[in-house]
Image (cartoon, rainbow, N blue to C red):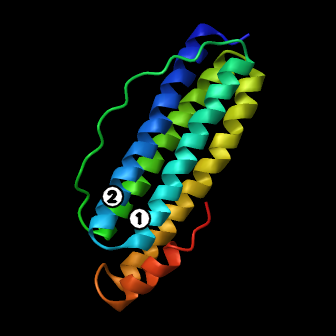
């Protein structure tokens, strides 16, 4: 049985994951308007992953006899600057999500809730990958800049992301 405070915190994380999806889709929309289809594709795949993360938590709450309560999702920003600035915001957002997951894990430890700790371990590992991926793209953008032929080549590369 899932304790009420942990259930509420996991429900909040569902909202956070869905907001992440919304944020990345807003970024994809800006990339589309900039004719950077590869960046838009990468961000759309990222948005889909965030929805899958929310679903994983949704299913976990239900599997543990809890109650999923969906809350309103805030409107994301509309403008994110150039792609360098945008991906810096991606990294910062992923670092914020990592902090949220760590807090959830700490709560699960305090409650001696081992199934929740195991579930959240998956998210901890996933966040390592999320931050690494964003940092790698920032590194490439720092190398090629956010204009010119290098950007077009990077756009094509990001467009190959499977998802």
Q: Position of residue 78 (x, y in %)?
A: 24, 50
Q: Give the percent coordinates (x, y) of residue 106.
A: 61, 27
The local crowd at label 1, few if under 14, some if 14 to 19, many if 20 or more residues have their Cα within 10 Å, is many
Sort mark 2 into few (<14), some (14-19) or many (20+) by Cα contacts within 10 Å. many
* Image disc number at residue 40: 1
- Out of 67 and 120, give the one closest to the viewer: 67
Disc 2 is placed on an element classified as helix
Is residue 84 in view from this perspective?
Answer: yes
Measuring from the top left, give residue 142's x and y in whole percent: 37, 78
Left or right, 81 with respect to 88, comes to left
Identify the residue shown where x is 71% and y is 33%.
Answer: 119
Q: Give the mark, 2 or 1, whose residue is nearer the N terminus.
A: 2
Q: Label 1's element?
A: helix
Residue 148, picture quadrant: bottom left
Q: Which quadrant holds the C terminus?
A: bottom right
102 horizontally vs 89: left or right = right
Closer to us: 30 or 86: 30
Is any part of residue 85 visible from this angle? Answer: no
Image spot of residue 20 (x, y percent): 44, 43
Residue pushed farthest bottom?
A: 149
Q: Quadrant of the N terminus?
A: top right
Residue at x-position 51% and y-position 55%: 46
Residue that numbered label 2 is attached to: 29
Cα–Cα gap, marks 2 and 1: 7 Å
Q: Residue 139's mark?
A: none
Mark 2 and 1 residues: CB-CB less than 8 Å, in contact? yes
């Amino acid at each position: 049985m899932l304790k009420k405070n942990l259930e509420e915190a996991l429900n909040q994380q569902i909202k956070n994951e869905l907001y992440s999806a919304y944020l990345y889709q807003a970024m994809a929309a800006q990339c589309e308007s900039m004719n950077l289809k590869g960046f838009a594709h990468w961000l759309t795949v990222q948005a889909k992953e965030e929805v899958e993360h929310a679903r994983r938590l949704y299913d976990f709450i239900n599997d543990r006899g809890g109650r999923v309560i969906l809350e309103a999702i805030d409107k994301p920003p509309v403008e994110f600057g150039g792609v360098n600035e945008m991906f810096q915001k991606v990294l910062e957002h992923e670092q914020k999500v990592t902090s949220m997951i760590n807090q959830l894990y700490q709560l699960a430890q305090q409650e001696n809730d081992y199934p929740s700790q195991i579930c959240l371990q998956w998210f901890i590992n996933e966040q390592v990958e999320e931050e690494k991926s964003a940092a790698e793209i920032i590194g490439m953008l720092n190398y090629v800049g956010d204009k010119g032929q290098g950007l077009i080549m990077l756009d094509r590369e990001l467009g190959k992301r499977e998802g």
